[in-house]
Image (cartoon, helix red, strand yellow):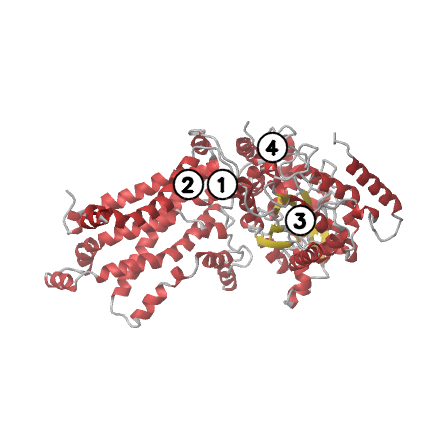
Amino acid sequence: MILIERLQSSRNALGLLFMLPAAVLLLLFLTYPLGLGFWLGFTDTKVGRAGEWIGLENYQFLWGDAVTRLALFNTLFYTFVASVIKFGLGLWLAMLLNRNIRFKTFFRAVILLPYIVPTALSAIAFWWIYDAQFSIISWMLVKMGLIDAYIDFLGEPWNARLSVIAANIWRGIPFVAITLLAGLQTISPSYYEASAIDGASRWQQFRHVTLPLLTPIIAVVMTFSVLFTFTDFQLIYVITRGGPLNATHLMATLSFQRAISGGALGEGAAISIAMVPFLLAAIMFSYFGLQRRAWQQGGADK
Amino acid sequence: MDQFNRRRFLEGTAGVAASTALGAGAIWAPAVHAQTALTFKPEKGAKLRVLRWSRFVQGDIDAYMANVKKFTEKTGIEVRVDNEGWEDVRPKAAVAANTGAGPDIILSTNDDANLYPEKLLDVTDLATYLGKKYGGWFPACEAYLRPDGKKWIGVALGAAGAMLVYRQSHVKAAGFDTFPKDTTSYLALLKALHAKGTPSGFALGNATGDGLWTNWLIWSHGGKLVDENNKVVIDSPETIKALEYAKEMYATFVPGTLSWLDPNNNKAFLDGQISLTNNGISIYYATKNSTDQKVRDLKEDVQHAQYPIGPVGVPTESHLFFNQMVMKYTKYPQAAKEFLRFMMEQEQFDPWLTAAGGYIAPPLAEYTKAAIWTSDPKHTPYRDCVKNLRPAGYAGKLGYASAGAAADFIVTNMVAEAASGSKTPKEAAERAQKRAERYYKV
């Protein structure tokens, strides 16, 4: 009895107690799997067979493995190009939707559609769109007389890379646009009125009012966008399985191919863990690079 | 050498008696007296869980479940059958083997049984019995399931064959009355088809099933991934020859094959865009059962052929192989073996083969006499898939290395690189050698 009473009157103990469920969840479902993956990366574990500690051997091999290097390049390229375009188009879309246009709510809802469709399904749709024999795009262009042979969307390495990036952009834009729209709506109209009275041009308003006030949101959105893109799996797995000639293999798909289909859990884990530094770097960049108060308040860099 | 024991002796003599009793032209009825030579006594209250790859054709699972029902009626043993996509069975089976809990029987593919042989129940008695009774197992079954040449770690179920599927009229129009049997005239056919505007197409993307033709290509020219001692020997003059051949083949393909995954060639063939490809019997199956009149019209014209024989002079085919594994942790080993015995006996196996419509080729010689292989001459080329089969890890021992190398598309990528000209044959072979050596590292 006394114990419970003492517990009730102790802020610290109560606080810890209330945090316990969350802490257990985090430890059990985040820290433990991550730690396990980290450990597996240093072993030669196979699916269904415990492994032995082999130190950095997996990483040494991966460093010298042409396919892994290619996958790393693909991942960086994929993430960079897709994120930049998603940001640009997403911001543009958000600005458009933030205006007083007709059917505003309707358009805002429609914008979300690509995000609502399960990725696996939209991936299958893209797979057909890019099909070497049945591509609707090629078919239309041929019918219009613009080209005379079907475009080899997924059969030529660079075409394939750009095609899957396009699919990723299509899928990722709604998230960026809607979140940025929410950010835009938090900006008080009085800033715009004040700047208009001062004679600011549209561009100046954007540069000195919208952008600084939006940066915190941009930082969050882009961090998530980069993380999602960097770890993309479904689109690639359905559309190309990493082909042609491994030109679209991302770290995530290669990790799966090696770990699950190939049975080399340790090596697959090492590939996944190799992604972590890049993800951390992305988070650090947004945290330290974009979350600076001076910048957000319209000041210049010191 | 096998240990000689009384039971085997009895089975052996029964088998011999049966085969001598077989008259020419008679309906094949192997070893009627052997029928009772081997039965297992299921444990009291036994229940079985079976995990199998999900059907490729509806007839397969219908007939399989009918057989399961028959088994339950006869023995009172409840059997639960779970289906998973064939590529998902591999990790599930491996985890089950490792943790010692899960299905009692797993129908898996390719080298799966070789990943954890010590976790599988020894089924030598059952395999020996079936082998004796039904004319013997084809060599590939032993390569997969009798790794040490003595102990059987699983019972072979068969293979989903991938054969050459072509349009008769187009091959004829290209000047070939019969389908080429050797690689030289085969290449001539590909060129002629291309010239006629009715090209062929073979998957060169990361296609797990339809990319297997690349194994045939390498083997037919004498190349192989590893030798008998698991030493990687893919970078060889034979491989280079095969890759040069691949380059010539590729020049005749329909555009886009580098991006092809498993379903692409089916779609292109059924749409009339290609006239020759490699595939299971499913294309023909589709022309028989499609609701689309355009597809049904193809039925008469679709024909099948075995892979042509290359400079090595023997068939060198690569197909998706099916195992039946009894897990060692099962509480009901006798019931499990009895189940497999029951399913493999002619009364059950024959109707199942028939229902699968030729999709599954039998592992036992006697079953090649089943009616399904002659009821429609178009089925016949698929009959000998297991007979002509080589494991993907040919000519080495199977295990994690062979499974990993196959899953990483090393051979498929090599052929694709060389065929498309993105690498020279020599470069492609060297790269494959390096990649494979990693898997086969000592």
Which is closer to the viewer, label 1 or label 4?
Answer: 1
Which is closer to the viewer, label 4 or label 2?
Answer: 2
Q: Earlier in the sequence, mark 3 or mark 4?
A: 3
Q: Is residue A146 visible?
A: no
Residue at image position (69%, 63%) is B288
Label 3 and label 1: CA atoms lie apart by 27 Å
> Would you call the spot at circle 3 few (<14 residues within 10 Å), some (14-19), or many (20 or more)?
many
Which is closer to the viewer, label 3 or label 1?
Answer: 1
Farthest-out residue, left: A198
Which is closer to the viewer, label 2 or label 3?
Answer: 2
> Would you call the spot at circle 4 few (<14 residues within 10 Å), some (14-19), or many (20 or more)?
many
Q: Is residue B153 left or right of residue A16?
A: right
Label 1 and label 2: CA atoms lie apart by 10 Å
Q: Is residue B25 left or right of residue B351?
A: right
The quadrant of the rendering that contains the C terminus of chain A is top left
Label 1 and label 4: CA atoms lie apart by 24 Å
> Mark 3 sits on what residue?
B162
Q: Position of residue A172 (x, y in %)?
A: 37, 55
**In the rendered structure, the residue with mark 4 lies on which chain?**
B
Along the line of sight, the residue nearer the viewer: B92 or B310: B92
Q: Are marks 2 and 3 on the same chain?
A: no
Q: Find numbered disc 2 in the image and state the secondary structure of the residue it sits on.
A: helix
Name the kind of residue labelled 2 in the image.
Answer: Ser
Q: Are marks 4 and 2 on the same chain?
A: no
Q: Is residue A151 left or right of residue B311?
A: left
Q: Find numbered disc 4 in the image and state the secondary structure of the residue it sits on.
A: loop
> Mark 4 sits on what residue?
B234
Along the line of sight, the residue nearer the viewer: A89 or B232: B232
Callout 1–callout 2 Cβ contact below 8 Å:
yes
> Mark 1 sits on what residue?
A259
Farthest-out residue, front: A1
Which is closer to the viewer, label 3 or label 4?
Answer: 3
